[in-house]
């Protein structure tokens, strides 16, 4: 009797990685593998990795070290994703018990690599150079969220920001044909999904290889598919954010009232050293387009503090930008040097203590901005998609079109099912969430 093939997969990092894992899981299941809940149960242990920040990378190697004892039980290990592409065969030196190393651009070759693994090979690599044209499309995606479907429309990055490792680990920008994207969106809708999120390292840098659709036109077309009630997209790059995206959001009600537009710094001088290829004024012009929309669109962003050469004045300009834009959410980070990036040659003279101080000042100010912003919604009636229960508070957890968490109560005898939509009257607010009662 053949031994059952089992696998465990842990994902580190961004939403792109999480969706890649859905496709990897589907591919493995198609190859006869069964997913299990722990390393101890699995014959094949996989880590889908992120190298955007140093701690995420370290976490992968710590995890590998924690479970290397399982190698003696005949279990096999594989490292996938960005750390795999970045470190390549050096992973075999750091962790000799690893049998497979594959970057995300090589996932199409997973069935072949799995066959080689099953045949007894102990060092299998799937590594591509930056010029790969491959994208990872598969009909075998094992979607982990039952109500929100993710679709990758563009992979890779051509922006080469001086601090970022993604162009070296994900390859060049390569877009899927609009026909393929819309076909997958229709399949998702036919399966009962009501929300779609379009993904890309720079999602709005999309260039249709079929020449049929701009990003804004593709966004609108997905939003008009029967059965779809919400469409989101992330992450946008300011350099490629065009006015027609806002026009599409005004024209198509299913496009959600939220834009994530990473600024990284409020100082044009820092942006120049980051090689972001836009100025503070360029960025604020795009913000003005969004704020001029007929509907109220929520804004979120990413900010790095302590980039090499960031002066106190540069940091003040970032704080001033917070006050001017009034974001509903900010993801703030301290700068950390990444392998192979141009910023490595810059003198990182800002002490860690000062970076930590600037980050805390930024987050404290943003928390106050959000406290005021969220409290303005008290008394409003908004549509919420149910995501689950918050047992500790006896509340139902959901999310608004503006991507804000909403915890609410209901007088219905049966709790609404995840994926259902309810009108909720907002009765209270915290800096990171809204509270209400279902109508």
Image: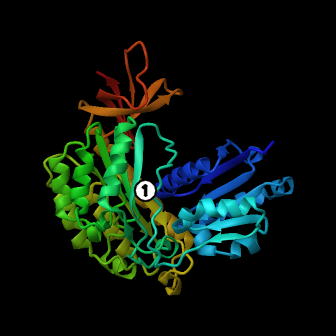
Q: Quadrant of the C terminus?
A: top left
Mark 1: few/some/many CA within 10 Å (<14, 14-19, 20+): some
Picture layout, residue 345 above or below residue 172: below
Locate residue 180, reporting x and y percent.
35, 56
Q: Residue at x 54, y 81 (%)?
A: 340
Q: Which residue is mark 1?
A: 363
Locate residue 71, reporting x and y percent.
82, 57
Q: Which residue is at the far front?
A: 1
Locate residue 317, reporting x and y percent.
31, 70
Picture layout, residue 300 above or below residue 400: below
Q: Secondary structure at mark 1?
A: helix
Q: Quadrant of the N terminus?
A: top right
What's the coloring here?
rainbow
Can residue 255 be seen in the rendering of this structure? no
Q: Residue at x 34, y 31 (%)?
A: 428
Horizontal relation, residue 439 to residue 305: left or right: left
Locate residue 206, reporting x and y percent.
31, 65
User: Between 183 and 11, which is closer to the camera in this rendering?
Assistant: 183
Q: Which residue is at the far top?
A: 413
């Amino acid at each position: 009797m053949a031994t059952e093939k089992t696998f465990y997969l842990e994902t580190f990092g961004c939403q792109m990685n999480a969706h890649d894992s859905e496709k990897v899981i589907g591919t493995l299941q198609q190859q006869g593998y069964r997913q299990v809940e722990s390393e101890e149960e699995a014959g094949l242990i996989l880590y889908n990795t992120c190298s955007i920040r140093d701690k995420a990378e370290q976490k992968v190697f710590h995890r590998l070290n924690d479970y290397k004892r399982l190698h003696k039980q005949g279990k096999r290990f594989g490292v996938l994703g960005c750390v795999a592409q970045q470190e390549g065969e050096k992973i075999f030196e750091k962790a000799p018990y690893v049998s497979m190393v594959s970057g995300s651009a090589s996932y199409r070759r997973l069935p072949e690599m799995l066959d080689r693994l099953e045949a007894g090979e102990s060092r299998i690599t799937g590594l591509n150079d930056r010029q790969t044209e491959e994208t990872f499309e598969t009909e075998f995606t094992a979607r982990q969220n039952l109500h929100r479907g993710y679709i990758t429309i563009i992979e890779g990055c051509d922006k080469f920001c001086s601090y970022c490792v993604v162009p070296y680990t994900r390859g060049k920008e390569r877009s899927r044909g609009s026909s393929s994207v819309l076909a997958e969106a229709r399949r998702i809708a036919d399966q009962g999904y009501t929300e779609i999120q379009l993904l890309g390292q720079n999602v709005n840098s999309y260039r249709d290889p079929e020449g049929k659709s701009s990003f804004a036109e593709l966004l609108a077309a997905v939003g008009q598919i029967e059965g779809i009630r919400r469409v989101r997209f992330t992450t946008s790059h300011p350099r490629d954010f065009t006015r027609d995206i806002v026009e599409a959001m005004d024209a198509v009600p299913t496009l959600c009232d939220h834009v994530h537009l990473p600024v990284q710094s409020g100082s044009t001088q820092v942006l120049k050293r980051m090689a972001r290829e836009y100025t503070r004024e360029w960025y604020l012009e795009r913000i003005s387009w969004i704020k001029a929309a007929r509907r109220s669109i929520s804004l979120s962003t990413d900010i790095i503090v302590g980039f090499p050469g960031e002066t106190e004045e540069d940091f003040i300009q970032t704080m001033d930008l917070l006050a001017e834009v009034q974001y509903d959410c900010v993801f703030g980070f301290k700068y950390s040097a990444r392998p192979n990036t141009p910023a490595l040659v810059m003198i990182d003279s800002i002490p860690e203590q000062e970076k930590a101080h600037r980050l805390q000042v930024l987050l404290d100010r943003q928390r106050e901005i959000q406290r005021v912003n969220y409290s303005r919604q008290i008394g409003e009636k908004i549509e919420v998609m149910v995501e689950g229960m918050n047992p500790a508070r006896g509340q139902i957890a959901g999310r608004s079109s503006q991507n804000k968490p909403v915890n609410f109560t209901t007088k219905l005898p049966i709790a609404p099912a995840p994926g259902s939509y309810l009108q909720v009257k907002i009765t209270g607010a915290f800096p990171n969430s809204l509270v209400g009662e279902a109508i």
